[in-house]
Amino acid sequence: QVQAVESGGGLVQPGGSLRLSCAASGSISRLNYMGWYRQAPGKEREFVASINSDSNTPYAYADSVKARFTISRDNAKNTVYLQMTNLKPEDTAVYYCRIIYLARIFWGQGTPVTVSS
């Protein structure tokens, strides 16, 4: 069983920055896919960014966050990060970590991000 725990959410003003973390724990040998999704109030969950070491294009971003968000990982810690800059009110959402391990999908509990003045 794999567990994913997010942290780093909070309230930030427009134009500000936040860094989210997602730490995976459990009997893990190697995580190939780690990603971030978000769900705004009244909307469906949507893709934000991912790292997939099995892909020819390991880094992927939603168009809405390109050039503002950066995904990275620390393999030794089984942790993925999402550095968010120039945040906008429309980035307000609960951010979820998504991990794929041995063909199974695991989700974290989510961390809320509110962008407001």
Image (cartoon, grey):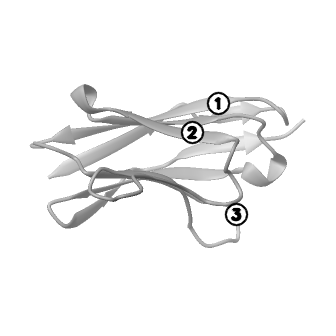
- Which residue type carries mark 1? Leu
Q: Which of 77 and 10 is in front in this view?
A: 77
Where, quadrant-wise, is the C terminus in this rendering?
A: top right
The part of the image, by quadrant, that contains residue 86 is top right
- Closer to us: mark 1 or mark 2? 2
Q: Nearer the viewer, residue 28 or 61?
A: 61
Q: Residue at x 61, y 44 (%)?
A: 112
Q: Nearer the viewer, residue 13 or 17?
A: 17
Instruction: Give the structural element (helix, strand or loop) at label 1.
Output: strand
CA separation in Å, label 1 and label 2: 11 Å
Q: Position of residue 41 (x, y in %)?
A: 70, 63
Q: Residue furthest front?
A: 56
Q: Is residue 24 above or below residue 102?
A: above
Q: Name the residue under label 1.
A: 18
- Which residue type carries mark 2? Thr
Q: In this view, does 109 lie to the left or right of 4?
A: right
Instruction: Give the structural element (helix, strand or loop) at label 3.
Output: loop
State yes or no: discs 1 and 2 in contact (Cβ < 8 Å). Answer: no
Q: In this view, does 80 lie to the left or right of 102?
A: right
Q: Earlier in the sequence, mark 3 or mark 2?
A: 3
Q: Mark 2 points at which residue?
A: 70
Q: Position of residue 7 (x, y in %)?
A: 48, 33
Q: Which of marks 3 and 1 is nearer the N terminus?
A: 1
Tell me, for residue 41, which label it has, or none. 3
CA separation in Å, label 3 and label 2: 23 Å
Label 3 packing within 10 angstroms: few (<14), some (14-19), many (20+)? few
State yes or no: discs 3 and 1 in contact (Cβ < 8 Å). Answer: no
- Closer to us: mark 3 or mark 2? 2
- Which residue type carries mark 3? Pro
Q: Which residue is drawn at 49% across and 49% down?
A: 110
Tell me, for residue 84, which label it has, or none. none
